[in-house]
Amino acid sequence: MKLWLKRGVLGLIIPLLVIAVFLSSCILKQDEQLQSDRPSVNVFSARHYEVDRAVFQEFTKRTGIQVNEVKGTAEELIERMKREGQASSADLLIVVDGGILNEAKESGVLQPMSSDVLRDNVPAEWRDPDDYWLAMTARSRVIVYARDRVNPESLSTYEDLTHERWRGKLLVRSSSSLYNQSLLASFIDLYGEQEAEEWAAGIVRNFAREPEGGDKAQARAIAAKIGDVAIMNTYYVGQMLTSSDPEELEIAAGLGVYFPNQLTTGVHTNISGIGLAAYAPNQENALKLAEFLTGPEGQTMLVQGSYEFPVNAEADMPALLRSWMSFIRQPVSIAELGRLHQKAADIFDQVGWK
């Protein structure tokens, strides 16, 4: 009986000791990460691209500065920075829309980035005039079409997509997408609210289905013959054309890319951008990372992996990107897009673009 009790007690103690040792090792690792003498930079990022991690790893390899990522939507991250104030751990904010980046500036969660290197890396057209934010990459929202069903000569402008010839053939993601909010904001800026609302209503009339999924989902729907044309960002097509997934390669091979409004107002072009957090605890390291991301080597890594457009002319681009580079862009201020987001959201609600 005593032997059985001893074995029972040992059977309880040994697992508890193992758990205690494991928890202690985890705590030690956390403590090591929190040591103030360890060089690091905390990135609040709304981007979800594998290439970013590769660039961060290369930066760490070169500088010894560890990059810690906190993921979330732009709205979530900005709200957290506002809520935490001076206690925020954020050093850099990276988002996928220039309009929301300017909203971050106006909400007080950013500070100016004083760096001659950044000014040399990024042309003035891609920077906030007060240096609160700058572009990391650029992206254009274009018309993607089924090669086997659409003659590109039948395409012309964003406005033409409201024509009845496209009834039941148009695919696009939901109105909650920052990409679509900024696209409509650009129309408000160019044409006024009335025409922007008429355009949005015309797009809704021509939906092939209720909006669902991201941009790649629209490409898949074209392949499935749910619709014939889609509004998409160019880099998704580039990613699919170089994918290791045979299905994506097959879908992308059947897609054409058309840059609209080349004889009128130009293609809507937006940015992924960087802002320096107002209370960045690792400000010097944050600036070093921003400089690397916008420098020739960082830019080359980014665009080779994401198929976005570089903002540094010294970047080495894939041939596909070079073939797309000659398009005319909209003459719209990126900062203005953010100020018009709410109006765009209101219009989407009014016309039933879900």
Image: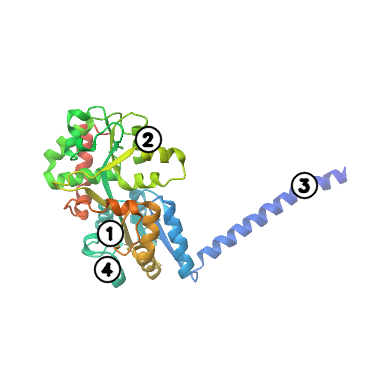
Amino acid bearing label 2:
Arg
Going from the N terminus, do you reach mark 2 or mark 3 first?
3
How far, Cα to Cα, is label 2 from label 3? Answer: 55 Å
Residue denoted by label 4: 119
How far, Cα to Cα, is label 1 from label 3? Answer: 57 Å
Quadrant (top left/top right/bottom left/bottom right) for the N terminus: top right
Going from the N terminus, do you reach mark 4 or mark 3 first?
3
Vertical comparison of 199 with 167: above or below: below
How far, Cα to Cα, is label 4 from label 3? Answer: 65 Å
Give the residue drawn at x 22%, y 27%: 167
Amino acid bearing label 3:
Gly
User: Which is nearer the eye, 5 or 189?
Assistant: 189
Query: Of the residues tagged 4 and 1, which is closer to the observer?
Result: 4
Marker disc for residue 220: 2
Secondary structure, mark 3, is: helix
Going from the N terminus, do you reach mark 1 or mark 3 first?
3
Query: Of the residues tagged 4 and 3, which is closer to the observer?
Result: 4
Going from the N terminus, do you reach mark 2 or mark 4 first?
4
Residue denoted by label 3: 11
Amino acid bearing label 4:
Arg
Q: Position of residue 120 (x, y in %)?
A: 28, 69
Marker disc for residue 108: 1
How far, Cα to Cα, is label 2 from label 4? Answer: 40 Å
